[in-house]
Image (cartoon, rainbow, N blue to C red):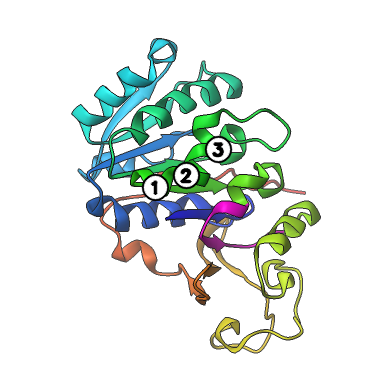
């Protein structure tokens, strides 16, 4: 399966994606997490994966070398070295994905997917191939992004399942509307009343706002609402509040400090 996991900045996207990874890592022979901002160190610290910094030296590795590396390490978080620019990371990610797809039963997670598969730049074939034909090779993928409008159209449209949070950008909401079959205003946290909300997507425990909301404690996001949907017709409203207590790994994602205005 290919899963699209997306929400605007500050919605708890990396926390939810780590939870999804933790739930699925045991089910695969090989796992590769392309960690753009080094946010998933909790997975190796919990013993679920190993950890490796991918930098200038690894830029020289071929797809075959990456295949050997993944087969040897089995499950690994690849953290981007700060010296690698987005174009370099995309180029290396293509070789990582190409090598990983040769290992058979593999889960590939692409964090900040709008850098690896950008809308307005040429996306390497191994990346688009993962989204379109990867399932036939035994590869599953999770595409994580906070800039859905900037992610390549084929990636978003080819995912068989979607886990989407809140968006206030009109460009992002337009992209959401293209790939869902329920009222897109459910994803706009500024909207209070949404017409024609399916029963299964109504909020639990309140009448309004009907749109997705996040839970905050001071400057920290302590939970958020999401909608899961897939091509089989499943649609569910989900809440991450209290989820940290169910996880084995600790989430180390950074949140910027608030500003006094």
Q: Horizontal placement of 218 versus 177: left or right? A: left
Q: Tell me the residue at 24%/54% (across/down).
A: 27
Q: Position of residue 190 (x, y in %)?
A: 75, 69
State the mark number for residue 128: 3
- Can I make out residue 164 in this image? yes
17 and 259: which is toward the camera: 17
- Can I make out residue 254 in this image? no
Label tally: 3
In whole angstroms, how far apart are the C-alphas of marks 2 and 3? 8 Å
Front position among marks 3 and 1? 1
**Circle 2 SS class:** helix
In whole angstroms, how far apart are the C-alphas of marks 3 and 1? 14 Å
Q: Tell me the residue at 33%/46% (across/down).
A: 138
| Residue 115 highlighted magenta (yes or no) | no
State the mark number for residue 133: 2
Picture quadrant where residue 35 is located? top left
Q: Which residues are magenta?
A: 157-167
Question: Is 93 located above or below residue 200 in the figure?
Answer: above
Please give the residue where the numbered disc 1 appears in the rendered image.
136
Mark 1–mark 2 contact, CB under 8 Å?
yes
């Amino acid at each position: 399966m290919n899963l699209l996991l997306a929400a605007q900045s500050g919605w708890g996207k990396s926390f939810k994606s780590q939870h999804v990874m933790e739930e699925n890592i045991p089910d695969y022979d090989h796992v590769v997490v392309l960690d753009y901002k080094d946010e998933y160190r909790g997975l190796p610290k919990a013993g679920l994966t190993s950890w490796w910094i991918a930098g200038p030296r690894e830029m020289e590795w071929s797809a075959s070398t990456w295949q050997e590396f993944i087969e040897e390490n089995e499950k690994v978080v690849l953290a981007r070295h700060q010296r690698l620019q987005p174009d370099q990371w995309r180029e290396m990610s293509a070789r990582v994905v190409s090598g990983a797809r040769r290992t058979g039963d593999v889960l590939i997670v692409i964090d900040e997917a709008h850098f690896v598969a950008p809308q307005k730049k040429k996306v390497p074939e191994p990346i688009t191939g993962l989204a379109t034909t990867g399932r036939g090779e035994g590869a599953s993928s999770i595409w994580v992004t906070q800039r859905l409008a900037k992610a390549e159209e084929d990636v978003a449209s080819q995912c068989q399942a979607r886990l989407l949070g809140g968006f206030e950008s009109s460009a992002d909401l337009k992209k959401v509307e293209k790939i869902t079959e329920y009222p897109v205003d459910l994803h706009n946290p500024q909207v209070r009343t949404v017409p024609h909300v399916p029963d299964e997507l109504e909020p639990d425990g309140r009448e309004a706002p009907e749109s997705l909301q996040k839970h905050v404690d001071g400057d920290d996001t302590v939970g958020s609402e999401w909608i899961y949907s897939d091509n089989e017709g499943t649609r569910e409203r989900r809440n991450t509040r209290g989820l940290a207590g169910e996880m084995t790994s600790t989430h180390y994602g950074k949140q910027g400090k608030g500003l006094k205005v």
